Amino acid sequence: MSQPVEPTGQSGTVVRSRVVVKILKNPMGLIAIAILLLMVVLAVFANLLAPFDPNFANIGKTLAAPDAVNILGTDSVGRDVWSRLVFGARTTLLSALLCAAVAVGIGLPAGLIAGYYGGKFDSAANWVVNVLMSLPGIIVLLTVRAALGPSVWISMIAFGILISPGYFRLTRTAVQSVRNELYVDAARVAGLSDRAIISRHIFSVVRAPIIIQTSMVAGIAIAIQSGLEFLGLGDPSVATWGVMLNEGFKNVYLTPSLLLWPAIAIGLTIGALVLLGNAIRDALEDADKIKHRRRNKAAGAPVERSRPKGKSTDTVEAGTEHHLVKVSHLGVGYPQADGSIKKVVDDVSFHVDRGEVLGIVGESGSGKSQTAFSILGLLPDAARIVAGSIQFDGDYTVAPGDDRVSQGRLSSLRGKRISYIPQEPMSNLDPAFTIGYQLVTPMMRVLGISKAEATSRAMKLLDDVGIRFPEQTFKAYPHEVSGGMAQRVLIAGAISCEPDLIIADEPTTALDVTVQADVLDLIRDLQKRLNVGVILVTHNFGVVSDLCDRVAVMQNGRLVEDGPVREILRNPKDPYTQKLLASMLEDKEPMTMLVSAGTGPGAAAEKEVAL
Amino acid sequence: MFTFILRRLAAGVVVLAAISFLTYFLLYFSSANIARNILGEYASQEQVHAKEIALGLDQPLLTRFFSWAGHAITGDFGTSWFTSQSVVSAISERLPVTLTLVVVAILCIAVVATLLGMAAAVKRGWIDKVVQTGAVIGDAIPGFVLAIVLVTIFAIQMKIFPATSNIAPDAGASAWVASLTLPVIALVINGVTSAAQQIRSAVIKQLEKDYVRTLRSRGISEREILFKHVLRSAAPAGLTVLSLQFVGMLGGVVIIEQIFALPGMGALAVLSTTQGDIPLVMGVVLYTVVIVIIVNLLVDLINGWLNPKVRVS
C-alpha cells in the first residue's frame, strides 16, 4: 500500500542512508516519524511544556471545561489534563523502550546462539519459547503484578520477557539460513572466530528485521501497558495515558472528552509505530519488485479490451479449418515497470494436425513454454497476447486483435479436447488429495460420468500407463509414489478424457535417465493408439528425433526454423539449429546414425543421444 | 495418530506443571499480608496468625506447592480465600461467558477473513487495497481503545446496545446476544483484517503452484480449484493465525470484559490477582493454559487431516 514515491536503484538493503531517504519519501513513513518526534519532544520537555505537576489537584475545579489555565480542562480531582498528557508521554515512551530493550536483550542473543550452534541450547530454548508463546500475556502480567506490585517498569520487564520469543524466532531463522552460506564458510576457513563471524556477517542479516520488529513491539507494549492501567492495575501515582483513560472511562457520562485525549495519544503513537515498521519494510523491499507487482495488478484489472461482441464467431482463414491447431504470428509479452512490453514470444507461426507430433525445441527462455501455455490458455495473469491468433479445430481461441486468451472458449476445451502433461511431476499433483481423486474428478466433471464409471476408467488408465498395482496407486497420496510414477499418473490424467491434442512441456526433463526412455515410449504408444496431435516442448533434440514428425526451433522468442524432423536434422539451415545440434552430438555417435534412428522408434542409440 | 495425540498431551502436562510451579512461586511473594487483608484491619494479631496457619501460609514454599498440586491433580482447586466459594464453581460460572465471547469472535473472524482474504487474492484491485490497508489500521488501533470508542458511541451515546451486561445465569438468549454483540464486534474488527491479510498471502502462494495450472488444464472449474484445492492447502496458515489470535484474545478479553462489564474469566482474573487470592489465581491460570493447549492440539490435528504429508510423520 505505501509505496516509495520514487523508487530508485535496486534493493538498497545494505546502504543505510538510502533506506532512510526512502522512508522519508514515503508519506506514511514521514507522518509516522513526525508523530513519533512530536511524542519524543513532549516526553523530553515535559517539565517545560506542562504548567502543572501531573499530580497537582485543584479540588475546587474538577471536570472543568478547557480554559486559559487548563487548556484541555481538568479531571475528576481537578488535575490538569494537558500536564498529565505530557508527562504521560514520558512514562509511556520510556516503558515501551524498556520493554523492547528487554525483549531484544533476551531474544537476540538467544536466537543467535540457538541458530548458530543449534544442539541442546536450541531445543531447550525452543521449548521455553513454546511455553512462553502459549501463555496469555495479560493473565501473566496480572499475576506478576499481584506478586511484585503495581510498578509500570516491572510489568514492562515481564512483558519484554513474554514477547522475546518474537525476536528469538526471527533471529534464529535468519541465522540458520545464512549459517551454511558459502561466505560464512569462507570466513570460517579464513580463521575468523565464531564471535567475529556472528558480529560481522550474521548480525548484519538480522539487523533490518529486528528494527522492524522493534517498531511493532513498542506499539504492542504501549497497548498492553495502557490496557493494564486502564484496568486500574497501574501505579495510580504515575501519570500515564492508560491511567487517564481509566479516569476518563469512569466519567464517560459526565465528561467524555477526558477519554478523548489519552485515546488519541495512544492511537496516534501506536499507529505511528506500526506505520513506521511498514515503511521500513517497504523501503527494504526491492523497489523494482513493488513497482512491477503493482503494475501487474493494475494490468490485471478489467483492462481486457475485448473486441466488439459478435466478432467472437470470427471465421478462420478459409482452407485452414482442417488443422487441429494453427498458431499465426503469435506474440506474447509482459508489461514492464517502465510501461514497455517485454516480448517473450514474437511472430511465431506453426500448425499441428491430428495424429501428428510437433516438437518445439529451444533453450530455456526461448519462449517455447510460453507458446504452449498460450494454446492452453494458461499464461500467467500478467501476460498479454500482443499479436497474432490461435485457432483450434477451426475456431479461434485467440482471435486477431485479442490481447488475452479467451477463457470462455478455452474452458470448454481444456481437459476435454486439449490436455497437458507438465514438466515436474511432483509439484503438479495436489499433495492433499489422493491420486485416484485427482484422476476421477476431471473425468466426472468433463465427461459427466458417474464416480463408479470414472473409477473403473481410472484403474484402466493407470494400467495403460504401465503402473503395476493400479489399486494401490489409486489410493496413494502423491508423496507416496516416485517421480516416474507421478509422471505416469499425470500422463494418465492427460489422456483420461480422450483429448484431440496433448501439450507436453518437457515431460521427461525432471525424471531419472532410465525412466525418461520409458515415459517417451509411453507417450509414443499412446499417441499412435489414440491418434492424437501432440505438441512436445523440449530442449532436447534426441527426444525430438525419437518422437516428432515435425519440429520448430525457437530462439529468443522467435521461430528460427521449422520443418519435417528428418530434413532439419539432416540439413539444418539456421546457424542456431546447427549449433543446437552440434552441442547435442559432440563426441557422440555420428549424425547419420541419429537421423536413421529417427525413423525407427525405440532404438537404444538415440536415447543415449537424447541424454 | 494416536501416539501423536498422546505425545502432545504428555508435553501439555509438562508445560502445565512448569507453569503451575512458576505461577505459584511468583504468588508466594505476594502472600505476606494476605491473612490481614482477608480478615480486615480490626482483626487481632492472634486471629491473623491463626488464619495464616489455617491457610498453610506458615509452611515452606515447596510443601505448600505440592499440597496444592496434590489436590489439583484430583480436580480439587480448593476454595477462594476471600469468598469461600470453590474455585471450580467460581470458574465454571465465568468460563461460559468468556468462551462464548472468544469462540464467537474467532468463528466470525475465520469466516470473514477467509472470504476477504480469498477475494483479495483472486480479484486483487480495490478489495485487495482495502484488506491491505485494513490490516495496517487493525494493527495500529489497540483492541481496547476500539472497544472504548464502540461502547461510547453505540451504548452510551446512541443507546443501541446495553453499556453493561445483563448476563445472569437465568438470562434469556436475547439478553446474551445484546450483551455480547458489541464486545464481539470489537474483537472481530481488531483481528479480522490481519487474519485476512495472512490468508490472502497463503492463497496467492497456492495459486502460483504448478498443480493449480495442471488442475486448470484438466478442465476443473476455477471455483472448484479455489474452494477445494487452494483453500485446503492455504488453510494451515490461516489456522495458525487464528490460533495465535485465540490465545491473544484470552488475554485481551480481560480488558474487553472490564469495558463491557461482562462477568467472565477476565473479571475474575483481575479480582483474584488484585486481592492475592492464590487458589483462585491458580485456577484461572490453569484453566486458561489448558484451553490454550487444547486449541493448539486441535489446530495440529486439523492440519494433519488437511495435509496427508504431515499425517504420516
Image (cartoon, coloured by chain):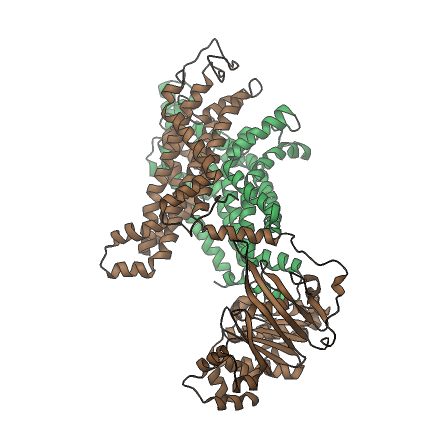
User: Residue B213: in sight, yes or no?
Assistant: yes
Above/below status of A450 relative to A268 = below
| x and y, in percent, of residue A313 in the image | 76, 65
Nearer to me, B91 or A309: A309
Task: Please name the residue shown 53% across and 38% down the image.
Answer: B137
Above/below status of B84 relative to A321 = above
User: Residue A138: in sight, yes or no?
Assistant: no
Above/below status of A366 relative to A46 = below
**In the picture, which chain is green?**
B
Q: So how many labels did they put on this image? A: 0
* Horizontal side of residue A222 vs A109, given as left or right: right
Task: Please name the residue shown 52% across and 88% down the image.
Answer: A595
* Horizontal side of residue B103 vs A206, given as left or right: right
| x and y, in percent, of residue A211 in the image | 39, 43
Task: Please name the residue shown 59% across and 34% down the image.
Answer: B183
| x and y, in percent, of residue B184 in the image | 60, 37
* Horizontal side of residue A509 vs A386, given as left or right: left
| x and y, in percent, of residue A214 in the image | 40, 41
Tell me what hue chain A is rendered in: brown
Nearer to me, B65 or A379: A379
